[in-house]
Amino acid sequence: MSTAASPGGLVIAGERSGVGKTTVTLALLAALAQKSPRVQSFKVGPDYIDPMFHQQATGRPCYNLDPILTSETYVQHCFAHRCQGADFALVEGVMGLFDGASGLSDVASTAHIARLLNLPVLLVVDCSRLSRSVLAIVHGYRSLDPRVKLAGVVLNRVGSDRHLELLTDALASIDLPILGVLWRQTAIALPDRHLGLVPTAELPQLPDILDCLAHLGHTCFDWDALTPLLETSSVSGLTPASYPVTPSPRHPVTPSPRIAIAQDPAFSFYYPDNLDILTALGAEIIPWSPLRDAHPPADADGLYFGGGFPEMFAAELAANQDLRSTLKALIHQGLPVYAECGGLMYLATTLVDLNDNAWPMVGVLPTSVRMTGRLTLGYRHALAEQSSLLLQAGQTIWGHEFHRSEAETPSSSPLYQLKRYGATQRHATEGWAPHRIHASYLHLHWGGCPEVAQALVEVCRQHRQGLSPGPD
């Protein structure tokens, strides 16, 4: 593993999940955004919702740093590239500082990313049930891996002045600065549900929340010490030209193929890199809403349905009957479709929601999907069992699953054989490819498999030029 000279920036880590690192991150971002319009944020790992909050705080897309879905080199170049022109850079970690993809190493952990980028770490500690024991926790985190440089700590959920005094006295012996203190009574609770935080599009009160977070940011941190850590610089040694975005398009793309991307509260899980890669490959991206629109965009050459929460809007999606009928006809006529997770659920015959109500969906996949109480979560190494719209049989890619629904009828001709991260045997098959559909529960980051994005643009180009085959 190589490390680049740091372009500047700070990593926010937790000593475990649930300690308040997202609140700390958003407080810092909201405060910084009132100082500069050029605040660039990042999120470690395969997360969609936290980056939505980052973007609302800064006005800029938040980019994911994931060495499994992409690569170590991609992470380094992405960070350096996106920091170009930014005044400040901040990376929100995932889980605890050293929690990675398995218990055998810290691969894909916050510590891994901090080492890759050579960035200092600000450790958030939940002090609600601690006094002198905070010393053991912080000392352990600082000494476990000397390559990870702790810049300081944030004491969160401090109960009183006396509590703070005890914590401060305990930490004095290791000479690690306390760079922030958040009091228990000033905690800001962000609403959540079965897959994490409620997305920003469903929170009309979000501007008020961000104002409160900015106030916390301005009043609860040592900005004299933090500002130099957050500032970017030009010493990374990585230039925008070296950023590994995409391969070249396979064919000239004039006029540009039009890819209609479902973007509304039901479908909101998209990596900004994926959309940037499509654009770099020559596609024209057309946002639209299956919740509100009576038909997809005119002259669309392909459809892209990302993940999201279709189960929360199943009644509205079902009520848009004319759209469902139109989509079914277009897909049977050969319109290319790429669908991930929530998109797969929408293309099924029926969606059974959290209240056990069954709602009709588009009906081009021969299965119903049902919400369950079981969370399917983790990295997957996927082997293509058959050639499809976007992959050739035998190709392998990395993806990530994160869902509480399941298909009631297994695919008779699955797209993938799946293997969990670190496993030696494949454990499941998954995915559908009827008509010109590529539908799967796997979320893909095309920074790690740009050939998938290239194939999507190519098949949409063929559709625009009338080269698509007819219906099955």
Image (cartoon, rainbow, N blue to C red):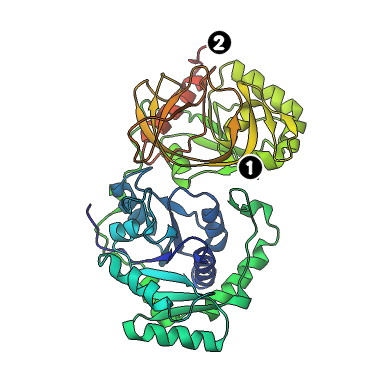
Q: Nearer the viewer, residue 84 or 421?
A: 421
Q: Quadrant of the C terminus?
A: top right
Per the image, label 2 sits on a secondary structure element best described as loop
Residue annotated with mark 2 = 472
Q: Nearer the viewer, residue 443 or 193?
A: 193
Reading the image, the residue beneath label 1 is: 309
Q: Secondary structure at mark 1?
A: loop
Compared with 180, 325 (above or below) is above
Is 384 above or below relative to 379?
Answer: above
Please report the residue visible at 65 percent of the width from the left and 39 percent of the height from the top.
Answer: 310
Is the residue 151 above or below the residue 15 in the image? Answer: below
Left or right of residue 347: residue 451: left
Three-letter code, disc 1:
Phe
User: x, y percentage for residue 228?
Assistant: 36, 75
Label whose residue precedes the other's in the sequence (2 or 1): 1
In front here: 255 or 105? 105
